[in-house]
Image (cartoon, rainbow, N blue to C red):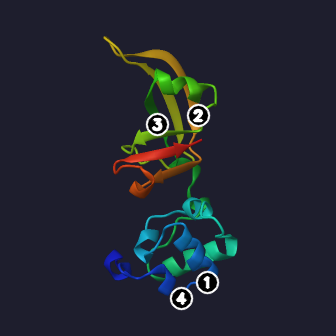
Amino acid sequence: MDKESLKGIRILETSLSARARNALSRHGIKFADELIGLTEFDLEKIRNLGKVSRDEVMAWMEQRGYPITRIAELAEDSRKTIEVKIATRFFEPLYWNELKFVVLKDTDHIMPGDTLILKEWEKGDTPHYTGRETTRTASYVLRNAEKYGVAEGFCVVGF
C-alpha cells in the first residue's frame, strides 16, 4: 500500500477505536497519510493517546505497510552528534538552561536522542566562534508544522 492509498482516508472514518480517533483528530491529524513517518516518540506526545491506543495506531499502520518506528528500534548507534552554530543572544539562555528549545534549519534531520553540540557564534564585522559550547540531547523534534508557525525546512528541537 502506498501513500496515495492512504490519502483521503479521514482519521474519523477509520476502524481505530473512538479514543484513538479522537486523540489524533484533536492533535490535528485529520488524514491517515499524516501518520506516515511518525515515530513512537511522536505518538507519545499526543494528548490522551495512551499506550493501548498508541499500540493500536501502530498496529493499524503496520497492517497497511507503514510500520511506525518503536522507541526500542531507535538504537544508540543510530543517534547522531551534530554541531550547530548558535548566535550569542540565543546561546546565553541555552547555556544557562533558561531556553528549553531552539528553531533550526532542518538540514541534519535531527531526531529525539540525537546529541547537539551548540557552539556560540558571534556575528559582527568578522563572524567567528567564541570557543564556548554546550551539549544538549534532543528530547523532541517538531517539523512539518506550518500551522504552528514552523516553516518548511525548519524544525523546533526541545531539550
Residue 91: horizontal and vertical position, in percent? 52, 25
Whether pointer 1 and pointer 3 mark residues with C-beta atoms closer than 8 Å, the reply is no
Task: Label 1, secondary structure: give it.
Answer: helix
C-alpha span from label 4 to label 3: 40 Å
Does residue 53 appear to the left or right of 86 in the view shown? right
| Residue situated in front as seen by the camera: 55 or 24 | 24
**Of the residues shown, which amino acid type is indicated by label 1?**
Ala
Q: Quadrant of the N terminus?
A: bottom left
Front of the two marks 4 and 3: 4
Task: Label 4, secondary structure: give it.
Answer: loop
- In this view, the residue farthest toward the right is 51
Whether pointer 2 and pointer 4 mark residues with C-beta atoms closer than 8 Å, the reply is no
Q: Earlier in the sequence, mark 2 or mark 4?
A: 4
Instruction: Identify residue for label 4.
Output: 15
Q: Earlier in the sequence, mark 3 or mark 2?
A: 3
Residue at x 38% of width, y 80% of height: 6
| Residue situated in front as seen by the camera: 125 or 84 | 125
Task: Label 3, secondary structure: give it.
Answer: strand
Q: Earlier in the sequence, mark 4 or mark 3?
A: 4
Residue 7: horizontal and vertical position, in percent? 35, 78
Front of the two marks 2 and 4: 2
Vertical position of residue 26 compared to residue 45: above or below: below
C-alpha span from label 1 to label 3: 40 Å
**Of the residues shown, which amino acid type is indicated by label 2?**
Leu
Mark 1 is surrounded, within 10 Å at the Cα level, by few (under 14), some (14 to 19) or many (20 or more) other residues, namely few
Vertical position of residue 95 compared to residue 155: above or below: above
Instruction: Identify residue for label 1.
Output: 18
Q: Earlier in the sequence, mark 1 or mark 3?
A: 1
